[in-house]
Image: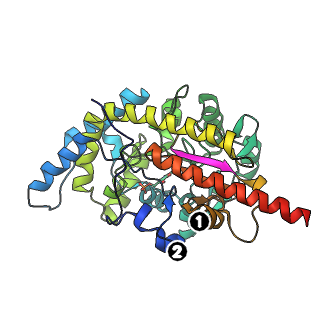
Amino acid sequence: MAYDFDVLIERRGTNCVKWDGLEQRYGDKDLLPFWVADMDFAAAEPIQRALLERIQHPVYGYSSVAASVYEAVISWLERRFSWSIHRDWISFPAGVVNAINLIIQTYTLPGEKVIVQPPVYAPFFNSVRNNGRQVVFNPLVETDRGYVMDFDDLEEKIDSRTRMLILCSPHNPVGRVWRRRELEQLAEICLRHGLLMVSDEIHGDFVYSGHQHIPLASLSPEVEQNTITCMAPSKTFNLAGLATSFVVIPNRSLRDRLNNTLTNVGIDPSALGVIALEAAYRHGEEWLDKLLVYLEGNRDFLKDFIQEEVPGVKMKELEGTYLAWLDCRELQVTGGSLSDFFVKKAKIAVNDGQWFGPGGQGFIRFNIGCPRPLLEEGLNRIREAVKEHRSASVSSRQL
Ligand SMILES: Cc1ncc(COP(=O)(O)O)c(C=O)c1O
């Protein structure tokens, strides 16, 4: 089947955060949005069909998760990642951020420490703080091979109050797909110190040629017993509005504890969400494989464009995710945030690197999950804004 990812779909007027939220977030509704992490593509046709069919039945009461939904998840993980799991290991929280909060509440006590690796998706550390736990930063280190984990720093920061590490894999926003030996080293340290590992693998389906996503828990039976994996079809198939995710917990006693929390707070899987999930994992694979080729084209287009046309901005290697991490430090923007600069001068919305915690200053996160014509227009705007900024800086230095 042919898919046309170049088609521009008008999303304004659907209450979508990315377009309809521009005014509230950036004070200007006419920006082109490259911020929040969803894509401007239509969901795959089998997903639309499954939802329509369900919607045509007019009763939308509580519903349970069919056995076929579990089978679809199990088969997906086996096919895509060679990870074999059991049905009992799966639970359905209402989204990954929801899961992370409930995980923090379930397995740590107020005042205990949770490690995150910034720059990283801000709800990781905000969830820790908002639940009254202490955030410990184990910052990623920039090297000429890209970002790497700092294992020495990690070991130094673990003490008797440290309970948990939250991993982002692949990593939002730096775009790394962690290699097996990196994951092994991380897991070895966490196991040795008795830290529970929470692995957010929501971007796991987005890896580009030459890379392979390895679920942390699949490393060994020992790691599997000490890991809680958060996954979802929401990024992969652009279904974030359906608030559906799943966690995989192979360890029986850990699993009982989270399931207890899910029951206590009254989380029932979304009826429409699980229908979309099943259709996606059963019938969406061809669409996804085509999408990955298209996104890789977007990535290469962005990389070439930045390299050739936007002096002063550098793109970090994007191994996975559709979120590029652009280093704008050389632009030396002053008098406001970088995202303000791009709003005012380029009329585009991006996430300011500072949102991602330590190490984010001077960067922006740029979402390439959009039709190429939109990407091109956004990049043309960046080129012009940067050109003007650089010539203004040169003339002010000459004064
Ligand atoms: C690493 C990561 N985790 C979780 C989420 C959000 O997931 P959910 O919408 O299921 O809460 C995002 C969204 O950008 C993300 O990048």
Say which amino acid is labelled 2. Answer: Gly
Judging depth in this view, the residue of 208 and 307 nearest the camera is 307
Q: What residue span does the magenta drawing correspond to? A: 322-327
In percent of width and height, residue 305 lies at 62, 41
In percent of width and height, residue 306 lies at 65, 43
- Classify 355 as above or below 5: below
The magenta stretch spans residue 324? yes
SS at badge 1: helix
Q: Is residue 161 visible?
A: no
Q: Which residue is mark 1?
A: 343
In percent of width and height, residue 14 lies at 31, 64
SS at badge 2: loop
Q: Is the residue marked by circle 2 packed among few (<14), some (14-19), or many (20+) residues within 10 Å?
A: few
The magenta stretch spans residue 359? no
The Cα–Cα distance between marks 1 and 2, rounded to whole angstroms, is: 9 Å
Q: Is residue 383 visible?
A: yes
Say which amino acid is labelled 1. Answer: Val
Q: In the displayed structure, does residue 107 sit left or right of residue 85? A: right
At horizontal 20% and vertical 40% (from top left) the residue drawn is: 67
